[in-house]
Image (cartoon, rainbow, N blue to C red):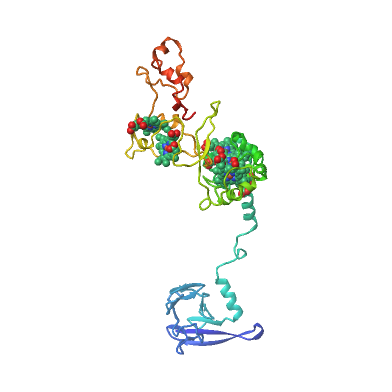
Amino acid sequence: MRWLIRRVLKKGKGAISYEEDTHFGEVLTIGRAADQAIFLPDLRAALNHARITLLSNGEYKIESLILAGIRVNGEIVYTTTAGADATIEIGNTRLTLLPPPEGYEGGVEVMTLDKGEQKAEKEKRAKPTRLAQTSLRKRWPAWALFVSILLFGLALPMFGHFNPSVGNFLRQSPLPSTLSWNPGTIDAAHHFFAADCTKCHQTPFRTVRDNACLACHANTAAHADAVKFNMPELGNAECRSCHQDHQGLRGLIRRDQRLCADCHANLKANTKNASSFDDVKDFGKAHPEFKLNLPNWDANGKFVPQRVSYAPNLKENSGLKFNHEKHLKADGLNTPKGRRTLDCASCHVPEPGGAKMRPVNFEAMCHDCHTLGFDTLAPAREVQHGKRRRLSRREGADDRARAPPPGFAAVVAAGKGRGARVGT
Ligand code: HEC
Ligand code: HEC
Ligand code: HEC
Ligand code: HEC
Ligand code: HEC
Ligand code: HEC
């Protein structure tokens, strides 16, 4: 079998010439060993790198003799068949299979790639790393994204903001609404209207005004009387300077020590001695003993708690006879609704804000167990707690029959029923 091996020789300035050789044999061996039909003086070629055989149908069979495979028509393969014009690349050599030249059964053209050709070859094989190397374009996807962000991020929520029924619909749907502008969780106390941003943000692009808060908090007492203490930090402050909402479920009230200590560390000096309170420099290390607010009533019967320091023999004069021990039994108490174990939080609940405790309240805390029924014929009928005048009032003959027993009203009128003061 006769093979034509044509070597392409490059001369300067792009001129080329050919050198032809004839090889006799069944296979065409390729490699770096001296006995190979096509000898490649290239370290990247193995001694026996590949071989080519001619098939009966005129195609070539190409086999790799190394584990890494060889590159035929740009693909790494181990064994393949290919027709004329297929290219094989080994190191910096490119072999092109030829249609059988006249007088030969097979033919190969061998060409050594120069630096420029090798580089171009490498680039052709490399995966694209820049958008410009692909068929993708930058401009229209950028515009599409920009317009959709404008539409879904701004226009749609804004439409919902100005049109409450659309706003409501958007909030129920998976579409973006003003909720997607929310910079953080609203405080738990405000959750019931949190989705209605306009309750606080009354005017778009304006900070939250005090009026928005005062719509609901008209009766919230100021932290301290700004007139009496005359401090700009109290008088000029807006609600939002201390109550930044969107800080989490319990984030409305700032509890950082610095805010409090800035003012309370020198409260006497800051208020020009208007305050009788001791200075507080640090919650943990420099806090005065807590004072107690004991129940007290002025001459007109108005509730004015009295501020006292703790003393071992201090006695609270609330008129209430309440035994903690009897109520805090670990195994619980019998109640009309079954057994119940009380803990401190059943009766002692902090005020919103947490500075003080809510007053103990009969209806919410005692009534479950201490129902005030007095009439077995009408168990739902109860004495009113703390309303002395209504207790002694008589309305009609039927009522008289079921009024409290004789003598009860007299006791109440004599003022001995002060326990009624709880929760009033
Ligand atoms: C309870 C009142 C209240 C409600 C309800 C409320 N916010 Fe706010 N929001 C505030 C306060 C207070 C601030 C801080 C003061 C300010 O920057 O005006 C604020 C600040 C913001 C800010 C600016 C954040 C920053 O870091 O500057 C955005 C944005 C905002 N709110 C969006 C919303 C959206 C959207 C809603 C409805 C889902 C909403 N808010 C509901 C009270 C509220
Ligand atoms: C729609 C009515 C409403 C508006 C408007 C409103 N609040 Fe409230 N706020 C409430 C209710 C109700 C509570 C819960 C009170 C309670 O638990 O007794 C509350 C609780 C609070 C608390 C105590 C929270 C806690 O964790 O204990 C603070 C502080 C407060 N609001 C400040 C503000 C500020 C500041 C604004 C204006 C930015 C504002 N609120 C606007 C209804 C409102
Ligand atoms: C100088 C800071 C400061 C300013 C300004 C301020 N607060 Fe407060 N507020 C506090 C602190 C601290 C607490 C928690 C301690 C307490 O309850 O006294 C609190 C507690 C509250 C509470 C829960 C306790 C309660 O008494 O019901 C409400 C509601 C409240 N503030 C509403 C407002 C409103 C409305 C405004 C604006 C008109 C406002 N605050 C301005 C610091 C401030
Ligand atoms: C701008 C100054 C200022 C800041 C800030 C401040 N307070 Fe006050 N605080 C006062 C003044 C003034 C009084 C009233 C003193 C008096 O009545 O003699 C007061 C009263 C109090 C009282 C007594 C309330 C009462 O009626 O029994 C407590 C408790 C208190 N502050 C805690 C705090 C805490 C906690 C903080 C921080 C979260 C704080 N204060 C931040 C100025 C401030
Ligand atoms: C069933 C409701 C209830 C439970 C539960 C309860 N308390 Fe009380 N507590 C009261 C009442 C009512 C008063 C007012 C008593 C009075 O005026 O004589 C009070 C008063 C107090 C006082 C004021 C000082 C005093 O003795 O008068 C303290 C402190 C106190 N409780 C702490 C606690 C602690 C701590 C717990 C949990 C271990 C607790 N309480 C559980 C109802 C309760
Ligand atoms: C979970 C049910 C329960 C609740 C809530 C409850 N009590 Fe009682 N209370 C009882 C039981 C049970 C007794 C009887 C205890 C005993 O004699 O050992 C009792 C007894 C009493 C007594 C008589 C105590 C004595 O020394 O004989 C008074 C007074 C009283 N409770 C007041 C209150 C007040 C005030 C509250 C609300 C702040 C309250 N109770 C809440 C179950 C309850």
Find ligand 5 in the image and state its quadrant.
Answer: top left
Q: Is residue 139 left or right of residue 47?
A: right
Nearest the viewer among 390 and 200 is 390
Furthest-top residue in view? Answer: 397
Image quarter of residue 341: top left
Position above or below: 319 against 243: above
Position above or below: 86 against 169: below
Q: Is residue 141 left or right of residue 55?
A: right
* Residue sitting at x 43%, y 82%: 27
* Residue sitting at x 37%, y 35%: 327
Nearest the viewer among 45 and 366 is 366
The mark tally for this picture is 0
Picture coordinates of residue 20 (x, y %)? Answer: 54, 87
Furthest-bottom residue in view? Answer: 34
Picture coordinates of residue 209 (x, y %)? Answer: 65, 40
Picture coordinates of residue 128 (x, y %)? Answer: 57, 67
Image quarter of residue 330: top left
* Residue sitting at x 65%, y 86%: 12
Q: Residue 152, can we see it?
A: no
Nearest the viewer among 334 and 66 is 334
| Quarter of the figure that contains the N terminus | bottom left
